[in-house]
Every structure is written in structure tokens, then in C-alpha cells.
Image: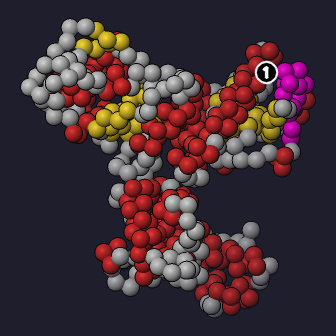
Amino acid sequence: MTLSIWFKSFSGEAAVATAVTKRLAHFGLTVRSDESFFHDGDCCLAAVSAVDATVIADLEKLSRSFHVVVLSVPKSLPRESRWQLLHAGVADVLDWTDDRIFAEQIVARVHRHLEIERLANDDSIRNLLVGDSPAWRELVRRLVEIASFSGGTLLVVGETGTGKEQIARALHLLDRRDHKPDLVIVDCTTLSPELSGSELFGHERGAFTGAVAARDGAFALADGGTLLLDEIGELPMPLQAQLLRVIQEHTYKRVGGNVWHNTEFRLICATNRDLEQCVRNATFRADLYYRLADWILRPPPLRERREDIPLLVRHFLEHAANGGSKVEVDPSLADFLLCRDYPGNVRDLKRIVMRLHARHVGPGPITIGALPPDDRPDGATLIEPWAEPGLLLALQRALDQGIALKEIGRAVTNVAIRMSLAQENGNLQRAAKRLGVTDRALQMRRASHGGLTSD
């Protein structure tokens, strides 16, 4: 397999491309300058000699589609510039101080990235972690890297319904150990003080009234596999202390027993609480927190990944059909689902889609009549018939970010004026007619909106 990387220069150093191509070719990596050869998710090596607002904006846009590594040429970039680049979304910033080290770094990064992309795009992972939005795909890539290239504990922090259990199942699936048991899940909200020891550590026969036989607990059942402690933030302080030893040393005693047992498992903890704040409030042990948080993932709420809603709707409908004929959604209903608020996030969306599927009868798409009365919008909340999903997503994203109506109106007006002028080749009269305003009104609007031009 030929490995390729896209080289893009922001430095103006013509000799850099030649030197980079020659050096990386020696290590079996083909360097290309033609962007059309590459696809979303591929690697890009960007040569940068100075950082300004334009470079930051270009690299930020580039990083949404490509895995970008910045090459600092011809001399090392300042420390503050490096952090700016990282915040813009680039994966790393490297200096070219040693030919061999530089080349080996780039080749190793390409190999790692390709493996992450391969696993992240595997059907089994895509069916568990459904979504194509940039924020969601980046989270999946991070999960794959954590699961495949580390053995540490993972803490998943997010709102209810954001997919924390699905993330745990994906990590368990990515685990490369042979003959691993099923994912073991413990809901910490259901652990009673009286039975928590037995649930987690197991018990010996006769350890307490009703213990007629020995029983394995969660730590024994997870041996060789993965253990999810769901809603770990709800765990009472006494139980937190008991948990610390088994996480640190992977040894435990059954309730009523004197023998130490060994267990090896990958630990995942999930919570909708801010555990760092809980540590500050002395309601969660600091030593336990730092044992749980080798890695932290924060799945975004659905309002921050609305472009995934149509894909999730199709996924849930296929699941509900259970191998039967596929059902589509009427455009009016699709627009409603796209713009609706989801306090329960993906779980909330799934609940509505399953209710729609249950109420749908006959052939054809699911229509708005299948929406149960208690899920329908209040009043006559109508969406303009010309409003495409892309516009609805943009408006919803602006509302989610707290953008005021005046600012939204100004932005839409700017775009409409620019588009009409561009379509009419800058002719003010024809553009005004297209917009349904007078020439004078269009001139005034252009002036009040910052002297817009047709570029």
C-alpha cells in the first residue's frame, strides 16, 4: 500500500516542498501538492513560517476535513503561535531540526492516523456511534486512539442521553484481548449500602442472611474484559474508599471472605456530574477521581451536532423496522425533528422516532399526523416552505449559541444582498428588484450593513 500525504505551503519557501518530498520519499511516503487527490480524513503537512489571522483561519478550515500537522520553517515558531495553531485544530507542530527524526515522526503519525481512521470507520463502530458531524467524528477518533493505543481508565462526562453507554460498548468492542467476557455494567444509582459490597466484590456462602451460595461480583465478572461504572458521581463516600484499592491494585476480597482475588479489567466510568467540582466540594474523593480519569471524553449534546439528526432518525427507523421495509420521513416532519429541542439528547430523539414508527400505518413516508399530540409544537409554529435543512441548521446553531435575533437578521440580510448582487453581476437595480426593495432602500441597506459589495 502506497502511503501519501498532502503538502501545502503557507511559508513561500519554494525549496521546502522539494526537500520534504525527497526526504519523506526515502521513508516510503509519497508527498503530493494536489488537493484533489485526497479525501476527508487524510493527512496534510502544512509548512508555516509565520502565524497571522489569515493563516489561522485557513488552517482552522483545513483541520475540519484533514488531519493537519504543521511544519515550522525555516525556524522555530514562537510558543504562543504554536498554541494558536493547536487551538485552530491542527494535530501538532513540528520543527525540522533533524532530517531522520522529522521524517520518522511524520511517517509514524500517518500510520497511526490511518489505523485510527480504519477502526473509526468500521461498520461495527459506526453502527454503535452514529453520526457524521465533525464534533462527533472527532470524539470517535479520540475514543479509538484511547481504546487501541492505551490501557488507562476512561471517564466519560456528559449530559443524560448523549451516548455514554454506547461509548463504553465501543471501547469494549475495540479491546484487542481474546476471549473477553461481555461488557459488565454497574449502575451506581441502584447500589444500596447493604448490598453494594456483594454487587461489586461478590460474597461467600453464609456471609449474610440469604447468602445461601457464593456469588461473583462485578469485578470478578469483568476479569479479562471491561467494566462500566455508570453514574459514578452518585457513589457514596464510604463505597468510594472501598473502590479505590481494587482500582489501584486490582485485588479484592469477597464479602465474608479472607482470600485476596486478582482481577484484570479495563475500567470506564460515566457521569453527568462535574466530578472536579465534586472534589472541590468534598463530595468525591480526589484520589479516586485521579485514578478514574486517565482519559476523559465529553460527548457533545445533540444541540451541538444537529446535522446528525437525519442520520440518527434513519438509524432508529431501521432498528424499529427490524429487517422490514425501510420507512422515510415526510419533509415537514423531518424539519420539525431537525429543529426541536431535545432535553434528553439522543435518547429523547430515539423515544420520539420509536413512537412515530409505532403510530405509522400503510405505505408511504411517516407524516406529521404520526406525531403524538403531546410531542406536537404549541401553536402554529410553521417553517417557511423554502427553508432548506442547511438554513435551518445554521439558524438553530445560532440560537443554540445565544445569538440575538437582531444579529441573525443582520447576517441573513448581508448574505441575501451579496447573493443577489452576485447573481445580477453587481447591477443594483436588478438586485433590488430581485430582493423586492427599491434601489434607494438597497443602497441604504448596503450602507447600514457595512458597505457590502458583490464580492
* Nearer to the camera, 276 or 204: 204
Q: Position of residue 227 (x, y in %)?
A: 38, 29
Q: On the rendered structure, is 64 left or right of 171? A: right
Residue 100 seen in the figure: yes
Q: Which residue is painted at 45% across and 26% down in the image?
A: 225
Location of the N terminus (image quadrant): top right
| Residue at numbered disc 1 | 103
Colour pattern of the rendering:
secondary structure
**Residue 56 vertical placement versus 207 (above, below):** below
Is 128 part of what is drawn in magenta?
no
Q: On the rendered structure, is 302 left or right of 124? A: left
Q: Which residue is painted at 64% across and 42% down in the image?
A: 122
Q: On the rendered structure, is 129 left or right of 229? A: right
Location of the C terminus (image quadrant): bottom right
Q: Which residues are magenta?
A: 19-33
Q: Position of residue 6 (x, y in %)?
A: 80, 38
Q: Quadrant of residue 100?
A: top right
Q: Which residue is painted at 22% across and 32% down in the image?
A: 235
Q: Position of residue 393 (x, y in %)?
A: 53, 66
* Nearer to the camera, 64 or 255: 255
**Residue 66 vertical placement versus 91 (above, below):** below
Residue 62 seen in the figure: no
Q: Position of residue 260 (x, y in %)?
A: 28, 9
Amino acid type, residue under disc 1 in the picture? Ala
* Nearer to the camera, 60 or 82: 60
Q: Quadrant of residue 215?
A: top left
